[in-house]
Image: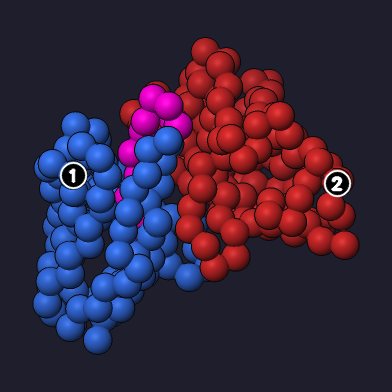
Amino acid sequence: SYELTQPLSVSVALGQTATITCGGNNIGYKSVHWYQQKPGQAPVLVIYRDSNRPSGIPERFSGSNSGNTATLTISRAQAGDEADYYCQVWDSSTSYVFGTGTQVTVL
Amino acid sequence: EVQLVESGGRLVQPGGSLRLSCAASGFTVSSNYMSWVRQAPGKGLEWVSVVYSGGSTYYADSVKGRFTISRDNSKNTLYLQMNSLRGEDTAMYYCARDLYGSSWFAYWGQGTLVTVSS
């Protein structure tokens, strides 16, 4: 089965840049999607197909994907960006696969 | 406006059964890929099951043979029949919409909590 690995936590200073990685075997050949989940709330899609932002998502959120690592970047981090972030891909053997999740703290 | 509203979650004993519902509005359930995704307390997201627009269904290994996904087109509602429940099935259950097989979940419900305990 396909697995996605994320760091447990990432800390970022207010106004600085946070980088969240998502590792998977040849993930660069797959489309990667990212979700933000705040406590007590349902997940929200923030990036789809590696680097595309849905309507309403700030430009501060960006994504890339190459080789064995996909990356979500949050520029000019704000207190409201504190949340758990999950990557996700579709795999032919396991259907939808989520990453292990990363807790982002804004200091 | 697209809305997904889950219901049916409650406390159930191990070995028991439960049926979750997800009422959709603003779009047609049968034209989309509809999934159930769960999240155990303090844990990450886990995909559970999907029904494709054509009617094919797929399940995570952890629930295969115990859970059944279905839909009622006349009610525009998605269901998850959960049998032989175990403690590890305790979780918030979300229904989610994959737009026409795009492979990502553009819309999520607010979830319904299932607790399996004696």
In depth, the one of B34 and A11 nearer the eye is: A11
Percent x, y for residue B34? Answer: 52, 31
Q: Colour of chain A?
A: blue
* Same-chain check, marks 2 and 1: no
| A74 displayed left or right of B70 | left
At label 1, which amino acid type do we have?
Answer: Asn
* Residue extent of the magenta highlight: A85-95
Q: Nearer the viewer, residue B98 or B73?
A: B98
Q: Which residue is mark 2?
A: B15
Q: Residues within 10 Å of mark 2 (few under 14, many from 20)?
A: some
Left or right: A77, with B63 as reference point: left
Residue, disc 1: A68
Residue A80 in view: no
Where is the C terminus of chain B found, in terms of image quarters? Answer: bottom right
Q: Magenta segment: does it hold A11?
A: no
Q: Is residue B1 left or right of residue B24?
A: left
Q: Magenta segment, principal secondary structure?
A: strand
Q: CA distance from mark 2 to mark 1?
A: 41 Å
Question: In the rendered image, is residue A24 in sight?
Answer: yes
The tint of chain B in the picture is red
